[in-house]
Amino acid sequence: MMPRFDAILFDFDGVLIDSEPLHYACWVEVLAPLGVKLEWNYYRDHYLGVADREMIPRIAAQTDPPLDWTALWAQYPSKRNCLRKRLEHPPFLPELSRLLEDLRQNHKLAVVSTSVRVEVEPALEAGQIRSYFEAVVTGENTEKHKPAPDPYLLAARMVGARNPLVVEDSEPGIASGRAAGFEVLFIPNAARMPALVRQRVM
């Protein structure tokens, strides 16, 4: 029997790994000296799935008084270094490797993230799961980010998929997958992802 989907396209943050709290903690750390306070609940509700380059102008505009967003963006290298150190031992689920091994028997696999490559690829390597993915699409690869369909359309082309399943946790990511014309599986948190994916495709 032919599998229902020919590829599985995974978002990274919040799907393959519970890294959103790490992104948040690093932004809190580097923006605090500028007087910027970030509340986790607001960050979670408004910025998950949003590229850093698009998020920072929004944060700057909402400070009181509003700040020059370029001053905040100047802290991005520090944020990136903070995250890189935290992801040297990435918190992937123990069962993730087995899931990917099972999936790749009948599906092509790819990662599709709005994060930059240096925040994704090293973590995949450190977690020893990079080899499962035929393609890794990151924020540098498309001019338009999620919720535009471009990232998922690119990933599908790269792996030669005609009917992929998109696995997403954020509103921009879900909108991106649907705009590309693909079926989307919503993931409420990374811990539930393996069971939900198995239920849908196996």
Image (cartoon, rainbow, N blue to C red):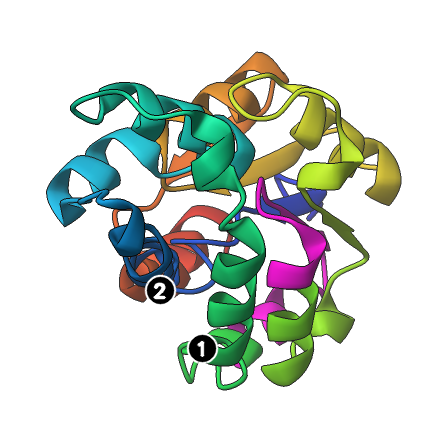
Q: Quadrant of residue 161?
A: top right
Camera-nearest residue between 54 and 65: 65
Q: Secondary structure at mark 2?
A: helix
Relative image position of residue 174 (x, y in whole percent):
44, 27
Camera-nearest residue between 139 and 164: 139
Is 170 displayed left or right of 164 in the figure?
left
- The answer to whether mark 2 and mark 1 are in CB contact below 8 A is yes
Badge 1 amino acid: Arg
The vertical placement of 70 against 133, above or below, is above
For the magenta stretch, what is the residue range?
98-119
Is 70 displayed left or right of 171 in the figure?
right
Badge 2 amino acid: Leu
Q: Residue at x 56, y 79 (%)?
A: 97
Residue position for label 1: 86
- Residue 96 lies in the magenta stretch: no
Camera-nearest residue between 150 and 36: 36
Q: How far is mark 2 from mark 1, CA to CA?
A: 7 Å
Q: Quadrant of residue 158?
A: top right
Residue position for label 2: 22
Q: Residue at x 45, y 77 (%)?
A: 86
Relative image position of residue 59 (x, y in whole percent):
32, 29
Category of crowding for the residue at label 2, using alpha-carbon neighbours closer than 10 angstroms: few (below 14), some (14–19), many (at least 20): some
Q: Residue at x 54, y 33 (%)?
A: 53
Camera-nearest residue between 198 and 77: 77
